[in-house]
Amino acid sequence: MSHVIVKTLLIPRVINLIAQRYQCSEEEACDRFYRSATCRCLDDADTGLYGQSALYIFSLYVAEEQRAAGIANEDLQP
């Protein structure tokens, strides 16, 4: 399966997870994701990120957001 097809399947799932997590519209979630470093990595075929699950990509996005907000992993509640 080509990378474009895989990304076409993955990205809507990731956007839906972002919308749920951050309680925002899918349009806002889409905008947030496409502006992220995680999305740029997904576009780079050399990273192999397109071969990972939507949940894994979402977790990278959340970690990126937490770093941007200055939240350390040890500060997170389970």
Image: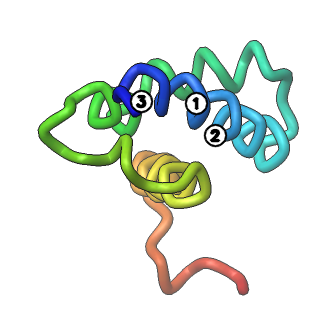
The residue closer to the viewer here, 60 or 56, is 56
Residue 54: horizontal and vertical position, in percent? 58, 49
Give the image location of residue 48, x and y in percent. Answer: 24, 47
Q: Is residue 12 above or below residue 61?
A: above
How far apart, in angstroms, are the residues tagged by discs 1 and 2?
Answer: 5 Å
Identify whether 53 is placed above or below 76: above
Q: Residue placed at 42% from the left, 30% from the top?
A: 36
Tell which of 52 and 60 is nearer to you. 52
Residue type at numbered disc 2: Val
* Nearer to the camera, 16 or 62: 16
Residue at 49% in and 64% down: 71
Q: Residue furthest front?
A: 1
The amino acid beneath tag 3 is Ser
The three-letter code of the residue at mark 1 reads Ile
Q: Which residue is mark 1?
A: 11
Could you tell me if the residues under marks 1 and 2 are in contact, i.e. CB atoms within 8 Å? yes
Q: Residues within 10 Å of mark 1 (few under 14, many from 20)?
A: many
Q: What is the quadrant of residue 4 in the picture?
A: top left
Residue plotted at (64% across, 20% down)? 30
Q: Is residue 30 left or right of residue 4?
A: right
Q: Which mark is residue 34?
A: none
- Residue 36, labelled with which disc? 3
Query: Which dot, 1 or 3, sits closer to the camera?
Result: 1
- Which part of the image, by quadrant, shows the N terminus? top left
- Badge 2 marks a residue whose secondary structure is helix
Q: CA distance from mark 3 to mark 2?
A: 12 Å
Q: Residue at label 2?
A: 14
Q: CA distance from mark 1 to mark 3?
A: 13 Å
